[in-house]
């Protein structure tokens, strides 16, 4: 296959899984789908941005080459022979509608997307790795790796040695907003995943120059609609207070989900809906 064919083949694996697999479910009585049609992007393992993450996130953050080499120590490979496959899983219209109505706690569908939808994401990662391996490539899902760890960052407080959102940013899929969420062409109401493989796919062009380019607050000083949407008061013009956010989530939302929806879960996402960047890259016309 040509490089273009490999890209289309890989995109089809991801999109077909979400479109056709019975695993794409919120596991509710209606058997609603967890995710809408994905976006897919690619970045090269030698992209300098991954070295830059060591400076911005922390020296512990893996480059694709570092993680691939730890996983497959006997496989001779150069950084530029690796591709990071990144994808966006947009929330469905129904889930966004449900959560848009909430002001204190997540809707049941949103909480299900956080728990059962992430189970779908795990299965998609494994499915993509299996398909790549069946085609003769070495592949790994960083989030599922035994080497993946949560870390403390001087700049960002809570971090990890591989960030799915940063992989998506590197792969041309979106930029960060005031609340730290990734604003993609399908909006900020989403989850994301990635796989690293020794496959040669041309990188997706990043249509931005700045990591905040899609956020109207950072580019034009307007919007700030996510600030009043946060029931924890964790979002201000200074950014996202992760400690306040987490303290509201656990145990308050844990207990609410268990008592009202009758499963062990959490989630919030109120700052990701009812805002101009919920389902698109916003423009000034979207602010009223």
Image (tube, rainbow, N blue to C red):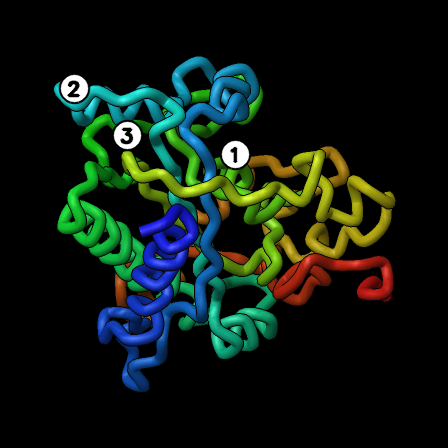
Q: Circle 2 is placed at which residue position?
A: 73
Q: Is residue 246 visible?
A: no
Horizontal placement of 82 versus 203: left or right?
A: left
Sequence-first disc among 1 and 2: 2
Crowding at dot 2, Cα within 10 Å, few <14 / some 14-19 / many 20+, comes out as: few
Q: Nearer the viewer, mark 1 or mark 2?
A: 2
Horizontal placement of 59 versus 74: left or right?
A: right
The answer to which of 25 and 199 lies nearer the viewer is 199
Q: CA distance from mark 2 to mark 3?
A: 16 Å
Sequence-first disc among 3 and 1: 3
The answer to which of 102 and 53 lies nearer the viewer is 53
Sequence-first disc among 2 and 3: 2
Q: Is residue 274 visible?
A: yes
What mark, if any, has residue 243 been given in the picture? 1
- Figure check: 269 above or below 76: below
The image quarter containing residue 156 is top right
What mark, if any, has residue 148 been given in the picture? 3
Crowding at dot 3, Cα within 10 Å, few <14 / some 14-19 / many 20+, comes out as: some
């Amino acid at each position: 296959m040509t490089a273009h064919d490999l890209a289309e083949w890989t995109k089809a694996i991801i999109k077909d899984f979400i479109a056709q697999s019975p695993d794409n479910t919120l596991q509710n009585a209606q058997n609603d789908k967890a995710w809408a049609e994905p976006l897919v992007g690619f970045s090269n393992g030698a992209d300098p941005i991954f070295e830059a993450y060591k400076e911005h996130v922390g020296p512990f953050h893996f480059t694709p080459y570092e993680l691939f080499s730890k996983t497959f120590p006997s496989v001779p490979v150069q950084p530029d022979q690796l591709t990071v496959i990144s994808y966006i899983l947009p929330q469905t219209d129904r889930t966004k509608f449900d959560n848009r109505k909430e002001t204190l706690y997540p809707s049941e569908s949103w909480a299900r997307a956080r728990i059962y939808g992430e189970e779908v994401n795990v299965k998609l990662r494994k499915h993509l790795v299996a398909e790549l391996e069946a085609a003769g490539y070495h592949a790994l899902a960083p989030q599922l790796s035994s080497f993946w760890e949560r870390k403390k960052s001087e700049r960002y407080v809570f971090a990890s040695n591989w960030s799915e959102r940063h992989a998506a940013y590197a792969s041309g899929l979106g930029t960060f907003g005031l609340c730290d969420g990734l604003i993609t062409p399908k909006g900020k109401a989403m989850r994301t995943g990635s796989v690293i493989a020794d496959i040669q796919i041309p990188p997706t062009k990043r249509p931005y120059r700045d990591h905040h380019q899609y956020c109207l607050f950072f580019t034009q000083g307007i919007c700030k609609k996510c600030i009043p949407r946060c029931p924890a008061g964790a979002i201000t013009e200074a950014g996202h207070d992760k400690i306040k956010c987490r303290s509201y989530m656990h145990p308050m939302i844990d207990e609410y989900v268990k008592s009202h929806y009758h499963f062990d879960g959490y989630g919030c996402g109120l700052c990701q809906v009812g805002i101009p960047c919920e389902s698109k890259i916003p423009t000034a016309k979207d602010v009223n």
